[in-house]
Image: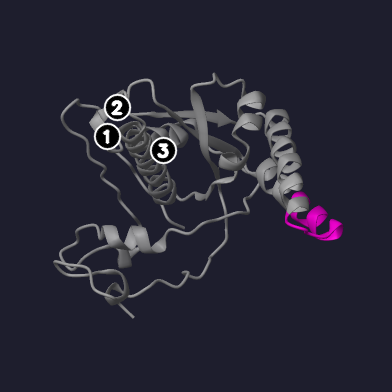
């Protein structure tokens, strides 16, 4: 079983994580230094969890990692709603499923297929010990008079929130937890806002599930670097 210790410095000018893994030597380089790539490569999207609570300390470390993500202008446009209450989880899951059902009907999905999809979705979100709804606010981002630059500013905020989510996923994995990043709130932002009583300027962007899991998942396929990297100028890769 993996054990991890994460030490966070809250200095305004410095932060580091010291992660010690026992019985995972493949995450260590030849000189005994942590192989960060190993952490990336071994993280998985885990959707099923054990009925075991996540400690407040570990949850705090995960949220602290999100807080230290890079952001445009250091505006830190992220806001997080942590949901543990089973009644709130169910209300949110059922409300999102109801909206999804309308979209599935538009797509012509048969009734029996819709029922199965919705049941799985509700179960997935209600069974997770913790839901973290990652939100975006533009209140501290730059303001422009023209739509084009304001659109770019919004995209920069989205990218910033995404960086915070990635930090959470990696630290959750380092702490021995499973997690999964869902974009479902994007399709029903008004529904999520209503259930969680979010102010209008706080936009739901994603939902992260967290919990303990025994799942050992195979790595998904990845494109080779030759397929995704060009040198100096764009070239067609194939």
Q: Is residue 159 left or right of residue 93?
A: left
Q: Which mark is residue 75?
A: 2
Q: Quadrant of residue 78?
A: top left
Residue 24: horizontal and vertical position, in percent?
A: 36, 63
As drawn, which residue projects farthest toward the front?
A: 146
User: Along the horizontal axis of the image, is 204 left or right of 39?
Assistant: right
Looking at the figure, which quarter contains the C terminus?
A: bottom left
Q: Position of residue 17 (x, y in %)?
A: 26, 42
Query: Residue drawn at (29%, 38%), measured in percent from left and top?
Result: 7
Residue 56 lies, with reference to residue 100, above or below; the image says: above
Residue 115 forms part of the magenta stretch = yes
Name which of mark 2 and mark 3 comes first in the sequence. Answer: 3
In the rendered view, would you say 221 is above or below 108? below
Q: Which residue is mark 3?
A: 62
The first of marks 3 and 1 along the sequence is 3
The local crowd at label 3, few if under 14, some if 14 to 19, many if 20 or more residues have their Cα within 10 Å, is: many
The Cα atoms of the two marked residues, 3 and 1, are separated by 21 Å
Main secondary-structure element of the magenta-colored stretch: helix
Residue annotated with mark 1: 72
Q: Which mark is residue 191?
A: none
**Residue at position x 25%, y 29% in the image:** 74
Up the image or down, 217 lies above or below 91; here it is: below
* C-alpha separation, residue under disc 2 versus residue under disc 1: 6 Å
**Given this view, does label 3 or label 1 mark the residue nearer the observer?**
1
- Is residue 110 visible to the viewer in this orientation of the structure? yes
In x, y percent, where is residue 217? 53, 66
Is residue 131 inside the magenta stretch? no
Q: Does the residue at mark 2 contact the one at mark 1 (Cβ under 8 Å)? A: yes
Color encoding of the figure: one colour
Q: What's the distance in space between the residues labelled 2 and 3, CA to CA?
A: 20 Å
Residue nearest the observer in this picture, 65 or 142:
142
Q: Which span of residues is magenta-colored?
A: 107-119
């Amino acid at each position: 079983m993996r054990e991890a210790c994460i030490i966070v410095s809250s200095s305004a000018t410095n932060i580091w994580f010291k992660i010690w893994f026992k019985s995972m030597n493949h995450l260590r380089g030849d000189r005994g230094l942590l192989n960060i790539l190993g952490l990336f490569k071994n993280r998985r999207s885990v959707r099923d969890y054990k009925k075991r609570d996540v400690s407040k300390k570990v949850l705090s470390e995960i949220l602290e990692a999100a807080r230290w993500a890079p952001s445009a202008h250091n505006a830190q446009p992220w806001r997080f709603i942590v949901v543990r209450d089973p009644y709130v989880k169910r209300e949110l899951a059922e409300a999102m499923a109801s909206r999804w059902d309308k979209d599935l009907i538009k797509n012509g999905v048969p009734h029996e297929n819709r029922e199965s999809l919705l049941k799985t979705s509700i179960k997935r979100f209600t069974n997770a010990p913790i839901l973290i709804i990652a939100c975006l606010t533009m209140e501290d981002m730059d303001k422009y008079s023209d739509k084009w630059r304001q659109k770019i500013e919004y995209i920069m905020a989205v990218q910033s929130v995404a960086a915070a989510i990635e930090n959470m996923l990696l630290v959750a994995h380092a702490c021995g937890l499973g997690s999964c990043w869902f974009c479902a709130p994007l399709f029903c932002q008004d529904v999520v806002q209503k259930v969680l009583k979010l102010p209008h300027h706080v936009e739901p962007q994603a939902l992260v599930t967290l919990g303990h899991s025994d799942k050992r998942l195979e790595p998904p396929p990845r494109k080779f670097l030759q397929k995704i990297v060009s040198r100096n100028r764009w070239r067609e890769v194939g």
